[in-house]
Image: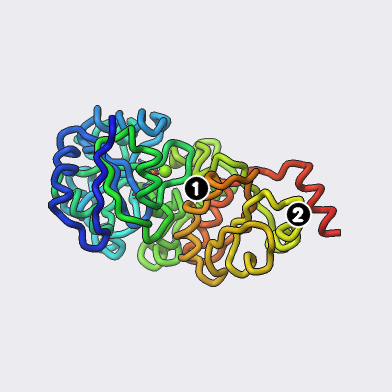
Amino acid sequence: MKAVVVECDYQNPQVERLIEPAKSLASGGIVVFPTETVYGIGANAFDGEACGRIFRTKGRPADNPLIVHVSGIDMARTVCDLDDRWVPKLVKFWPGPLTVVVKSSPSVSAEARAGLETVAVRSPSSPVARALISLSGVPVAAPSANLSTRPSITDGDSAVTELGDLVDFIIVSGRSPLGIESTVIDLTSTPVRLLRSGSTSLEDLEKVFGKIEVTDTARGIGEDARPLTPGSKYRHYSPVRPLYLISRNQAISIGNDDRFSDYLFLCSDEVAGKIRNQSFRLGSETDLDGVARNLYYAFRELDQRNVRGGFITMFSGKGMGLALENRIRKATSPLPPAISSLIEELSN
Ligand code: TXA
Ligand code: MG
């Protein structure tokens, strides 16, 4: 199958171009579309067969549920049991990059929620996604539009390259403005629990929801024996080429050593300015939002360059920092002994 590729302006979508993709969604089709975080691969959440096709297309484990995208509170009520006390809090973040896990309505296909009693719901702010959901008239179950284990897709060209032969429509609207997935919180637990860090900051959430319990998996440190969020137990977000985490000082040292000239250094503008080897500038150290926008894009760039692998430095802190730290940890592998002894030699 060859997907029909539809170009659409992100801010002011040409609604007439979305009519066919919306019809396709409503009648069992699979449509890739841009959200403010990353591109999604969507199907009608009520249609078990269509949702099943998403799992097969991505190679996604069947026990990892999808996020259901809705146009707002009213549509959310058709897919879940939404306690009235959450509504005033939710509308502070919706539309936007916050996903909430709540009790599911039976109407949501078992495939979309991977057989769980709960469902993950979010109302995206992307004007294209909003127009598409409204036109289709159905809630859209959509995981990130990458093949399973690969980095999420944050630009239309990568969506066409990776999924062009596998879906019905691909709506292309340039680079995703945020670049990292939505934050996922569990509203069925007290206190509210952070299941996945993301584009809505913990600090902003706590102002509205009170103290939030942060699990180790949400930080990216270790894996829970019984994961609270099924997605956390799988390898994720990784480039195909090996990517190693090193410190800022190590980057400056080996980034100027010829033995590492066939590696790509993913680092801040500040570090890139101090090294001679090939680098990909993620953005300024003082602009974590900018780094988030570029991170997955850089992972894909690493796979396209003719290099042996990559090195990346850590970004952490408030705001986007928590999500960046989690994604970087999940994407990197331990340094092989040969490389770590070379690094050690250089720093002596
Ligand atoms: O920004 C985003 O969230 C993007 C765009 C497309 O909206 N979507 C996305 O979906 O990142 P996906 O499938 O890649 O991640 C969904 C996450 C997974 O970690 C999954 O385990 C978790 O949400 N999840 C879904 N339903 C859940 C549930 N009922 N309970 C706990 N975790 C759930
Ligand atoms: Mg994903």
Q: Nearer the viewer, residue 202 or 246?
A: 246
In the rendered image, residue 132, in percent from the top left (x then y), is placed at 19, 49
In the rendered image, residue 215, in percent from the top left (x then y), is placed at 51, 50
Q: Is residue 19 left or right of residue 183?
A: left
Q: Quadrant of residue 143?
A: top left
- Classify the position of the C terminus by image quarter: bottom right
**Residue drawn where x is 82% and y is 56% of the image:** 346
Residue 221 seen in render: yes
Q: Is residue 330 left or right of residue 145?
A: right
Q: Quadrant of residue 147?
A: top left
**Residue drawn where x is 39% and y is 41% of the image:** 161
Residue topped by disc 1: 300
Q: Is residue 330 left or right of residue 71?
A: right
Q: Nearer the viewer, residue 294 or 204?
A: 294
- Classify the position of the N terminus by image quarter: top left
- Whereabouts is ligand 2, in terms of quadrant? top left
Q: Amino acid at mark 2?
A: Asp
Q: Residue furthest right?
A: 348
Q: Nearer the viewer, residue 94 or 189?
A: 94
Residue 258 circle label: 2
Helix, strand or loop for disc 1: helix
**Residue drawn where x is 25% and y is 63% of the image:** 11
In the rendered image, residue 210, in percent from the top left (x then y), is placed at 40, 63
Q: Nearer the viewer, residue 304 or 140?
A: 304
User: On screen, 316 above or below 42?
Assistant: below
Going from the N terminus, do you reach mark 2 or mark 1 first? 2
